[in-house]
Image (cartoon, rainbow, N blue to C red):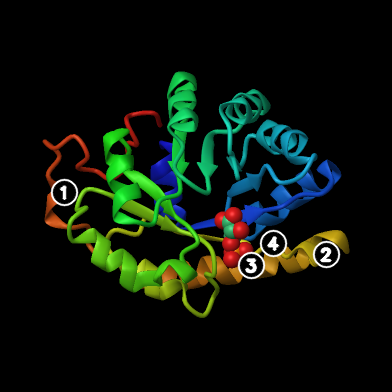
Amino acid sequence: MDILSAISSARLVPVVVLDDAEDADPLAQALVAGGLPLAEVTFRTAAAQDSIRVMAQRGDIIVGAGTILTAEQVDQAVAAGAAYVVSPGLSRAVVERCREHDVLALPGAVTATELQAALELGLTTVKFFPAGTSGGPAAIAALTAPFRSLSFVPTGGISPANLHEYLALPAVTAVGGSWMVPQDRMREGDFTSITELTAQAVALAQAAHRPQPPLESQDTSRPNAHRRGNEGTT
Ligand code: 3PG
């Protein structure tokens, strides 16, 4: 299964901030036990690269790198074993370096101008960040009208209370968020709670209405038809 298919099937991406790479293995175990073998490990701490390495070596969880701001960080993330790369915004340098490594790039884009630039870079899926303060589901629905071939992974301000509003939109592949992995629980070594929060989120996401993709995206003769490819680097 390619990375975007795995993200689409899970409908959820836990966004993780690890201060200590020692927590990486128990965290991966907690996510897998909660039914979510997927994590976006953010490059916001010195422990990010080692944490990705530890998690990727397990072989039972798909690990992406988040908060990637530069092409050099793409190199570091991929060297550590990241299977895909997420950026808060749209950077040509980051997307092109991902393409060189043949890893999926999932950059942030929230305005019509940014989405048009994403299309010009050959992308089919973007992170919609920060989702809550960028207009939420209503903004995604409005942007889908002109950008029919784009899919979104909204992140930022999403919680168990509102994830169904995003997942009800045909153009939403999955939602991301940090609520499944609270930093205070991790600091306390309370991985049982993380498994419980994750299992609750998985149940909510699976129960949320799963809309049919638009007719356009079901036409497999179109290059972007399956809403998976992001320029074929999967
Ligand atoms: C991200 O990097 O995607 C966000 O920090 C996650 O946003 P949240 O903490 O509101 O879930």
User: Would you name the residue on which mark 2 appears?
Assistant: 190
Residue at the spot 39% in from the left edge and 48% down from the top edge? 126
Give the percent coordinates (x, y) of residue 84.
52, 36
From this viewpoint, is residue 35 visible? Answer: no
Give the percent coordinates (x, y) of residue 32.
64, 52
Q: Are marks 2 and 1 in contact (CB under 8 Å)?
A: no
Q: Determine the CA span between mark 2 and mark 4.
A: 10 Å
Q: Pick whichever of labels 1 and 4 is earlier in the sequence.
A: 4
User: Would you name the residue on which mark 3 appears?
Assistant: 179
Residue at the spot 18% in from the left edge and 49% down from the top edge? 217
User: Would you name the residue on which mark 4 appears?
Assistant: 181
Q: Determine the CA span between mark 3 and mark 1.
A: 33 Å
Q: Quadrant of the C terminus?
A: top left
Q: Determine the CA span between mark 4 and mark 3.
A: 5 Å
Task: For mark 2, give the secondary structure.
Answer: loop
Kind of residue sitting beneath label 1: Gln
Kind of residue sitting beneath label 4: Val
Q: Is residue 134 above or below residue 21?
A: below
Kind of residue sitting beneath label 3: Trp
